[in-house]
């Protein structure tokens, strides 16, 4: 299966608790092994359980692609060491970079795949350039449907993307050109427009919140290149 429904301790907002790339999935600590097994089966990459300042909502704080993992500057030293050690043990050559900024909810404010990134227009140009250097992809500043939380308003992989249903045709064309994949509009979890908060996706599959409806799943599969 390329798609499965799941909840994390009764929450359907999976993207709040993790980050998926084509090399690794970073996931909050403490999930049941049965749910970790579903993530491994669908996303087909290793899992690393981590926290940020002991918080489990790591998906809000981390932006990542196959080249790098960007974490806020206030991550505890022990957490950073544990992340680097886990990546080394898995033999994964992925940079982990601390990012100095007043804007620390990187997962909410950065939408990225292995070709490009869209970052909130609230990031100064100098910080956007630093993110470009770290992630190793072209970076543009902007909004989606008027929202600065572009990482919450969209999900993009190397196969496709889904964004907030109020995104304009012009925005969709711009995003397709930027990320070099087809981009569609849609919702998850029974009409939630902030689709990035509702799922974990990479080029192998997608795990969506358990409230996601059948019609929403069809659109998600189409948008992310699984139909």
Image: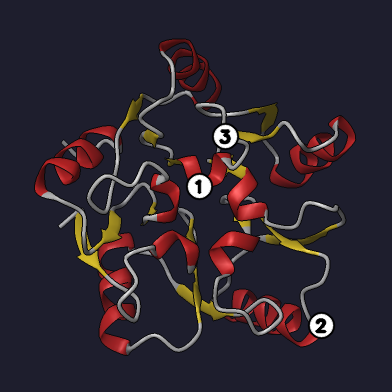
Residue 163's spot in the image, x, y percent? 41, 34
Q: Residues within 10 Å of mark 1 (few under 14, many from 20)?
A: many
Question: Looking at the image, which residue is at 60% across and 54% down?
Answer: 107
Question: Looking at the image, which residue is at 38% across and 46% down?
Answer: 195
Question: Looking at the image, which residue is at 31% across and 52% down?
Answer: 204
Looking at the rendered structure, the secondary structure element under dot 2 is helix
Can you see residue 25? no
The residue nearer to you, when weighing 90 against 141, is 141
The residue nearer to you, when weighing 227 against 107, is 107
Side of 109 relative to 128 (left or right): left
What label does residue 152 carry, if any?
Answer: 1
Foreground disc of the pair 2, 1? 1
Question: What is the quadrant of residue 14 in the picture?
Answer: bottom left
The residue where tag 3 is placed is 147
For residue 29, above or below residue 212: below
Q: How far apart, in angstroms, are the residues tagged by discs 2 and 1?
A: 27 Å
Residue 51's spot in the image, x, y percent? 61, 80
The residue where tag 2 is placed is 77
């Amino acid at each position: 299966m390329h798609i499965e429904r799941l909840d994390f301790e009764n929450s359907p907002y999976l993207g709040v608790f993790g980050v998926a790339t084509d090399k690794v999935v970073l996931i909050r600590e403490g999930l049941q092994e049965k749910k970790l097994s579903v993530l491994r089966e669908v996303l087909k990459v290793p899992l690393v359980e981590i926290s940020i300042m002991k918080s489990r909502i790591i998906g809000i704080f981390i932006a990542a692609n196959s080249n790098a993992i960007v974490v806020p500057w206030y991550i505890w030293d022990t957490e950073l060491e544990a992340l680097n050690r886990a990546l080394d043990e898995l033999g994964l050559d992925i940079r982990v970079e601390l990012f100095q900024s007043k804007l620390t909810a990187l997962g909410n404010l950065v939408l990225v795949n292995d070709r490009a990134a869209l970052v909130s227009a609230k990031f100064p140009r100098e910080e956007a350039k630093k993110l470009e250097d770290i992630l190793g992809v072209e970076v543009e500043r902007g909004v989606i449907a008027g929202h600065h939380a572009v990482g919450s308003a969209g999900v993009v992989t190397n196969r496709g993307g889904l964004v907030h249903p109020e995104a304009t045709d012009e925005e969709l064309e711009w995003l397709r050109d930027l990320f070099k994949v087809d981009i569609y509009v849609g919702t998850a979890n029974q009409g939630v427009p902030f689709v990035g908060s509702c799922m974990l996706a990479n080029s192998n599959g997608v795990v969506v919140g358990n409230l996601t409806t059948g019609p929403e799943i069809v659109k998600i599969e189409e948008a992310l290149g699984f139909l």
